[in-house]
Amino acid sequence: MKTIIKKGHILNPSTKMDKVADILIVDGIIEKIEDEINDADIDQVIMAEGRYVMPGFIDLHVHFREPGFEYKETIETGSRSAARGGYTSVCPMPNTNPVIDSKEMIEWLSKKEKEESLVHILPVGAITKGQNGTDLADIKGMAQAGAKAISEDGKSVMDVNVYVEGMKQAKESNLVVLAHCEDKNLVRGGVMNAGKKSQELGLKGITNAVEDVITARDIFLANETGAKLHLCHCSTKDSVALIELAKKAGYQVSGEVCPHHFTLCDEDIPCDDSNYKMNPPLRSKEDVLALKNGLKSGIMDVISTDHAPHGAEEKSKSMVDSPFGIVGLETAFCLTVTELVEQGYLTKMELVEKMSYNPSRIIGIDKGQIVEGKVADLVIADFEEEYLIDVNTFASKGKNTPFHGKKVKGRIYQTIVAGKVVYDYDKEQ
Ligand code: DOR
Ligand code: ZN
Ligand code: ZN
C-alpha cells in the first residue's frame, strides 16, 4: 500500500523541519520526505496544500470507561473521538470497573486495542489494587504485559509508604508515574474553585492547596526514589512554580496542562452548570495566566485532555450531585490554536511539541516524529479555518463540554495511524 501526502506544510520538532514537502508512505512506514515525489504506482494521494502535516497527537490522559461504564464511553467510541481530534496514541486511565490493576487486565486492554481501537493504546496500570490506596498492584507484571505508566488517576495515593514503594517499583520497571495531585483530606466537599465565584453561587470551594501540597510531596518523593514523575492536569500557579523549582534542581519531572484550564477561569462559570465541573476545577484568572506562561516558557511540557465523558443524565444534575469531568479529545487542537497560538503563547511548532513530541518522550515511545523509517502516525490540519464547536458532531458518547457554540480556529482534516486514514473530515461532510 502506497500513499502520498502532497504539498503539506510539515512541522516536525525533532528535526526542526518547517517546510512544504511531499511524504511517501509505504505499508504504514514513512519511506521518503522530499520537496517533490513523483511515483507512478500510488494507491492513494492526499492533497494537503495550504494545510499542516504534523506527527499525530499523543494524549497522556484520557478516560475510555471500559470496562464497567460503557454507557459513558467505550474503547471503540473513545478511539473514534481521539481520531477525530487528531490523536494517534492515547493513555486511557485505569479508573474503570474493574480497575486496570493486573497483568491480565493490561493484556485484556491490548486485545481490545487490536480488535476495536482506531488509535494506538498506551496502557496505564493502577498503583494500588482496585485503587484501594493500600495494597500495591502488580506493577512489574503490568510492565511485562506492556504497561507504559502507572497512575491512581481520579485520586492520589494518600499513604506515602505505599506510594514510595510504588514509585520504586515504577523506576525498576522503567514506568513513568502519572500523578493526579489532590489531598483528599483538604477537599471538604468542594465542587469548584474556592473564591468569589463559589461564594456567589453558594457552592463549596476547592482551594489551590488541595493540589499544591500533593504536587510538592510527589516531586520530593519522586526525587528520593528516582522515579520519573509526570504531573497530570496542573491547574494552579504554584504547581507551575514548583515544577520550575524542581527542574532547576535537576529533578526528573514534567507537567501537563489541559485546554479547559488555560481557556476558562472560575469567573467564566455562568451558573450552577455541571459542564463546568471537573477535577481539578477551573481556577482563578491569575492561575490561568500562570499556566499559559508556563507553557510558553517551557516549564509545562505537555497539553493533555483529561477527556472524561459522562452520561447526559448524570451531568444534567447540579454541580453538587454530578460527577467531575468534561470531554476534551475533539476540542483540544482548536482550543490550543485559538487560545495559545493565536494569542502568541505558542508557535505552531511548539503546539506540536506539547501535543505530540514531548508526550512521546515522556511516556517513552518512538513516536511524535515525521522522520523516514518511522511509523506513519500523522495528522493533517488547517490552523486558520474558523467555526463554532458543535457537540452534535462529536464521535465521543460524552457531550459534556462547556465549549458548545464557542467560536474557534483550527480544523483537523485527516488522522493517519500506521499509514491508514482513520479520520477524514471531508468524508464526514
Ligand atoms: O474531572 C475529572 N474526571 N477528574 C478526575 O480526576 C477524574 C475524571 C473522571 O474519571 O471522570
Ligand atoms: Zn485526575
Ligand atoms: Zn483524569
Image: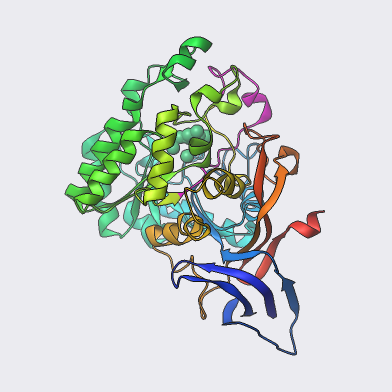
Q: Which residue does the image show at 65% across and 47% down from the upper left? A: 409
Left or right position of 78 against 196: right
Residue 290 occupies quadrant: top left
Decide whether residue 315 is among the magenta residues: yes
Q: Which residue does the image show at 57% across and 46% down from the upper left? A: 332
Tell me residue 272's x, y (percent): 59, 17
Is residue 361 placed above or below 331 in the rendered structure? below
Q: Nearer the viewer, residue 204 or 262?
A: 262
**Quadrant occupied by the N terminus:** bottom right
Q: Which residue does the image show at 37% across and 41% down from the upper left? A: 129
Is residue 360 placed above or below 262 in the rendered structure? below
Residue 146 occupies quadrant: bottom left
Left or right position of 227 against 364: left
Give the residues drawn in magenta, as a range. 303-322
User: Does residue 401 appear in this view?
Assistant: yes
Tell me residue 18's x, y (percent): 53, 70
Q: Which residue does the image show at 46% across and 31% down from the upper left? A: 279
Decide whether residue 159 is among the magenta residues: no
Q: How is the image coloured?
A: rainbow
Left or right position of 404 against 346: right
